[in-house]
Image: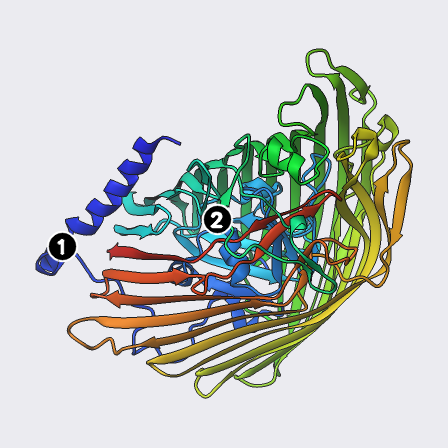
Amino acid sequence: MKPTARNILLASSAYLMTAAVPAAAQEAAGYEPVADENADASPGIEDIIVTARRREESLQSAPITVTAFSGDQLEERGITDFTRLAQATPGINFDAFPKAAPRPFFRGVGSSNQGAGGDPSSVAFLDGVYLGRAAMLGIDFYDMERVEVLKGPQGTLWGKNVVAGSVNFVTAKPVDYAEANAQLTFGEYGQMNGNLMLNAPVTEGIAARLTLGAVTNDGFRKTFDGRALDDENKLSARLHLRADIGPDTWLLLTGDVANQDLSDSSRFNVLLNPFTPGKGYADYANPRRANPDRLGFTKSRTGGVRAELSTDALGFANWTTVASWRTLDYEFSSDLDGTDAATNAAIGLPVSGLQTLAKERADSYSAETRLSSLSDGPLSWVAGLFYNRDQIYRERETQQSATPTTINRFFGHSTNDSYAIFGEAQYKFDFGLRFFAGGRYTKEHKEYRARRLQGALAAPTTTYDTETTPGVFDKGVFTYRVGADYRLSNNVFAFATVSTGFKSGAFQEQPGSATLARTPTDPERLTNYEVGVKTDWFDRSLRANISAFWMDYRDFQTIKVVPDLTQGPTGTRVTFDSADATIKGVESEFIIAPVSWFDATVRYTYLHPYFSRFIQTAGFDASGNPTFVNGAGNRMSRTPKHAVNATLGLQSSHDASWGWLRAEVVMDYQSDAFENNINDYKEYRKPRTLWDASITYNFDDRYSVQLWGHNLTDKVYRIWQTNGGFYQYVQYGAPRQLGATLRAKFR
């Protein structure tokens, strides 16, 4: 990252905020206040329009479990990355290693597989475009219209690899009038963020919207000599250009880029602390300093271009076509042990250090064309075609020395082609009952080429190379969704669905032989049975939404780093195993806003996720023979049984001449969870509760200043860990942080 670019953005945001200080005097010159969506005159709880079923509909009328956040809610709650989004959404967890490549888990279903031959089980879409690699989630969250978190398989309308859920990022699009937003954030640990949005009509029928972002943090933790750990450093830009090219016809062109340049993450070896059965290893009281002998880094650049053409000219249906290209250039290096050779020797680690590295280059090309009915009659439908091609190249290695002289590097190159035809139809009766059914046929073809280098670093040898004889996964799969919903009254809406999802077979990232390198796993399959009710009461001053589900999960591709003595006493290998699981649970959301000055939101998720079949590879002896553990009956990893997110808000009247105040307190609770599927309490997360709070002073509809605090009790909690027999390395979440955010909006 170049500090000059970041400083220019921060200065531009500050200038935009101050340029209109005499705004009141300039209203006659064409400035108009931004309408406040939460003004006292707005009755009831805000409704959000979602596109979970590829058409616009009210959140309260969508027969699917959705947690949605408007753009304003994202800003007010400081949701600027996937970590904070997951904290605000019970039922979602994530694998946080590496920091720039989070991998989501929905209702216990996800994948830690980072290899070129693997895919996610729960995915994200940016304006409908599939983000197939974890580091592609490093997008800018500023100037979003909304974010939709869809629970359960979306294998009909969204398709590829949406086994258990998806996050749909919907960015704000150009409008035909001039407007601008700016935001500046300052906080502890050198936190300085700047965001800027400029929207302007270019000429009649053409408008552009530019969004810029900069995020920087000097590190929540430090090395003993003062170098940054757990830092942030990101620059981003997004440009939309929309043109009306005919009656009811428009073209939207988009380009975006996000560039991250991070230092290493901190590591702490809790194996040195006391172990309590049923509670695991004790945590450090104040983990703020680490001593890596080789400071790692993460460099990631992701972005792409997108074209969308939409027209109602056909009369009977809207025709939308989207073509896109997403790209990723990623490099990662980490001192896994987080300390120096002398400390490793003192604690009994039989090697001087453990280093991990990965390089990845990925390109994803996709195209989708679909028709959506426009008739107001009882029958509505959507149908389309989809194509995706992913080309992924990746290197990975774990080095067992602070100064390695040997190499054990794995190279993977995957080419994936996915073709699909899909459709869904719905019929509505006059008395409020609707039936719907849809299906998707997907053809997946994946070719995986692998190579392994071993031996002396100066003159390595090739152990195997499958370039000319790659592994192949080729399969066609049909997924479906059927159900019914019924509006019992204006206040009560009920639904019931059966839906399926699948994920294509995966190839191992660190196979021990050419034969294993060519052998794919079976595809994952999931069937979800779900019922729910959505209700609004007392003129929409009380909302209660509840859903219950039962998921039958087959051929779950479990990923685990296990000891491999063929590579030395601390050698490891990434293994794949297959399992079946039954997951059942309840999702709920309660919102109350009885008066203009008070509101509260409580979201609660209960999960009961257990394996019904699971034989896991436990390790490899010096001769390469595997050992196994029977994990049937174990709880799935990264899955708290109970998760609660609650927000309490108080605000003054908007009628006062001095402006108005809003105060919020947010509680995020998760019960205990295992980091692995063996449930041995070594890789274990204790229950934790995080408290955030903010108070915002709105001068008027344009200007506001927010004072905020995250993790107010300075809770020490784990977000990632790994156990290798001689070590138990953990990574902790962010400590308490206080700061302020200044915002300005102009129209």
Q: Position of residue 320 (x, y in %)?
A: 54, 48
Would you say residue 296 is visible in this rendering? yes
Q: Is residue 112 above or below residue 697?
A: above
Give coordinates of residue 399: x percent, y percent: 68, 28
Q: Position of residue 157 (x, y in %)?
A: 65, 55
- Please, which residue is most extreme toward the front here? 346
Relative to 107, say whether 435 is above or below.
below
Q: Is residue 183 left or right of residue 640?
A: left
The residue at which mark 2 appears reads as 288
Rendered image quadrant of residue 325: top right
In the rendered image, the residue lying farthest to the left is: 25
The residue at 66%/65% (across/down) is 672
Nearest the eye: 618 or 289: 289
Task: Characterize the local packing of mark 2: few (<14), some (14-19) or many (20 or more) Cα atoms within 10 angstroms.
Answer: some
**What residue is at 47 percent from the left and 37 percent from the top?**
262
Name the residue type under label 1. Answer: Val
The residue positioned 47% from the left and 63% from the top of the image is 69
> How would you rate the neighbour count of disc 1 (Cα within 10 Å): few for under 14, some for 14-19, many for 20 or more?
few
Residue drawn where x is 76% and y is 18% of the image: 455
Q: Which residue bears the numbered disc 1?
A: 21
| Residue 41 drawn at (x, y percent) | 30, 78
- Would residue 568 be found to the left or right of residue 243 on screen? right
Q: State the image quarter where residue 696 is shown.
A: bottom left
For this rendering, which residue is in front, 531 or 611? Answer: 611
